[in-house]
Structure formats: structure tokens, C-alpha cells
Image (cartoon, grey):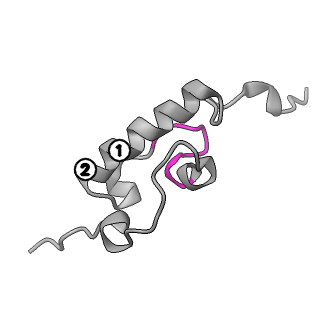
């Protein structure tokens, strides 16, 4: 029998899900600033949709980057 996934946000109602808190949203982004799946973040479907919406808002406003910038790597020849 599969274990039921416990959502972080359902457990702790005080965790912020808002574009105004980009430091909290970065936990749900991978190293290339893509949104992690709900199976990796351990969130329920309701809160995952809310997270995606708020991350997209923060990206449009400019608080979070859309993609990882490739110029940060030094290419040695």
C-alpha cells in the first residue's frame, strides 16, 4: 500500500506562498530555475498549482529569473 503524501503547506499554515517572498519560492526551483514537480517538493495538487502561479508572478515582476544565465560559467579552452 502506498503512503499518503503529506503536504508541507497543509501541515504548517504559516508558510508563505506569495510572490512577495521570493526567498521562500526558491526552495521549489531546481538549479536551472525550473519549477520542481510536486512529487519532488512533496506538495498536494492544490498548493502546487498555487506555487506555480506565484512563481510565474514573481518571474514576470522580475523577482525571480526565468532561466539560468549561461554567462555565469567560465569556459576554459
Residue 60 coordinates in the image, percent (x, y): 56, 24
> Which residue lies most toward the right here?
77
Disc 1 element? helix
Relative to residue 67, is residue 26 depicted above or below? below
Q: Badge 1 is on which residue? A: 50
Report the magenta residues as a range: 27-35
Q: Quadrant of the N terminus?
A: bottom left
The residue depicted at 61 percent of the width and 45 percent of the height is: 31
Residues tagged 2 and 1 counted as in contact (Cβ below 8 A): yes
The residue depicted at 38 percent of the width and 72 percent of the height is: 12
Residue 29 coordinates in the image, percent (x, y): 53, 46
Residue 66 coordinates in the image, percent (x, y): 59, 28
Disc 2 element? helix
Q: Badge 2 is on which residue? A: 46
In magenta segment, residue 31: yes
What crowding class fits label 1: few (fewer than 14 Cα within 10 Å), some (14-19), or many (20 or more)?
Answer: few
**Predominant secondary structure, magenta span:** loop
The residue depicted at 32 percent of the width and 58 percent of the height is: 43
> In terms of image quadrants, where is residue 54?
top left
Amino acid at each position: 500500500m502506498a503512503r499518503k503524501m503529506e503536504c508541507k503547506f497543509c501541515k504548517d499554515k504559516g508558510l508563505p506562498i506569495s510572490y512577495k517572498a521570493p526567498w521562500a519560492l526558491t526552495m521549489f526551483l531546481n538549479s536551472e530555475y525550473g519549477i520542481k514537480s510536486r512529487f519532488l517538493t512533496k506538495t498536494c495538487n492544490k498548493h502546487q498549482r498555487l506555487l506555480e502561479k506565484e512563481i510565474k508572478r514573481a518571474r514576470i515582476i522580475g523577482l525571480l529569473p526565468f532561466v539560468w544565465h549561461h554567462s555565469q560559467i567560465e569556459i576554459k579552452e
